[in-house]
Image (spheres, grey):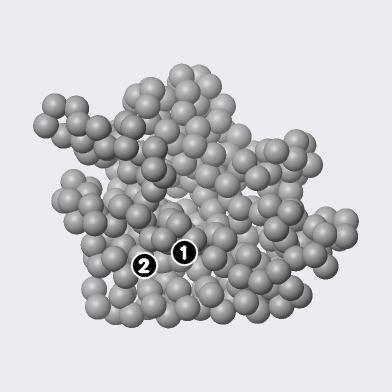
Amino acid sequence: MTRQQLIEQIQLKKSYLCVGLDTDFEKIPTHLKSHPDAIFEFNRQIIDATKDLCVAYKINTAFYEVLGSKGWDIMERTVSYIPDEHFTIADAKRGDIGNTSTQYARAFFETLNFDSITVAPYMGEDSVRPFLEFDNKWAIVLGLTSNSGSKDFEQQKTGDHFLYETVLKTVSTWGTDGNLMFVIGATKASLLAEIRAIIPNHFLLVPGVGFQGGSLKEVSKYGLNKDGGLLVNASRAIIYASEKEDFTTEARAIALQYQTEMAGYLAAI
């Protein structure tokens, strides 16, 4: 997906919502657990219930990899089921020496046909570069994450700057705002104004709204740019909104709440 196509979807749907399909068999509604294809069926129903309210879906690959070959099959069928107008994210956090990263990129961009993949930048440019060499595909690089452990490295100073600032400044020169995004945790919303001064035009993938306590209002206030520039992810708050047979109705209701609030913020740009 191109940058312009993503912007058009945000404008059309008045939404920058990303729904996280981090599906855990133990947490899906009881009535689905006896289904012969339970996880895919759960994903299918969540997608059908939310697809007009969101612009992206994020699949955390760990929830599928843990199931072995069956999980990879479910992941492949899930990403194929997502409508083409949605931006798809493989939340795999890959990053290795160049020839290995090339194989990761081919796996997620060619075999599974995701639009993007999350990437860890610790090993430097040659580990990220392979993900930037595919047309209309994106590397979403970890910048400043929501977890408490971000203070161990990301928020340590290297000279006059925090490490995450160095990452943002340096990595942004490796690609363009048409093939690079950055992960910025919603719980770090107070720093978004400073982050936008470093990368004013890049899209930001923002997890952490909902169960992790991030504020959509604060993220939107400091993170939105003229094109929208945000993909705000909500996973558990939407997909596990109900444990009963009404789970799709409740998931849609929560997604609609997010979309309605987002529409208001977009209108103010």
Would residue 161 be visible to someone looking at this image? yes
Q: Is residue 34 left or right of residue 164?
A: right
- Secondary structure category for the residue under label 2: helix
Disc 1 secondary structure class = loop
The residue that mark 2 highlights is 216
Q: Residue at x 49, y 46 (%)?
A: 116
Considering only order in the chain, which callout, 2 or 1, is on the residue closer to the N terminus?
1
Type of amino acid under label 1? Gly
Q: Residue furthest left?
A: 160
Above or below 32: residue 151? above
* Disc 1 packing (10 Å; few <14; some 14–19; many ≥20): some
Q: What residue is pinned by disc 1? A: 210
Between marks 1 and 2 in the image, the one whose residue lies nearer the viewer = 1
Q: Position of residue 101 (x, y in %)?
A: 50, 26
With respect to residue 44, does 80 lie above or below?
A: above
Q: Between 177 and 119, which is closer to the camera in this rendering?
A: 119
Res 231 seen here:
no
Quarter of the picture containing the C terminus is bottom left
Horizontal arrangement in the rendering, residue 98 relative to residue 90 (left or right)? left
Q: Amino acid at mark 2?
A: Leu
Q: Is 63 drawn above or below residue 228 in the view shown?
A: above
- Residue under the point 75% across and 36% down: 68
Location of residue 265 in the rendering, given as x and y in whole percent from the top left corner? 31, 75
Q: Residues within 10 Å of mark 2 (few under 14, many from 20)?
A: many
The residue depicted at 23 percent of the width and 52 percent of the height is: 191
Point 17% across, 51% down: residue: 194
Residue 187 left/right relative to 19? left
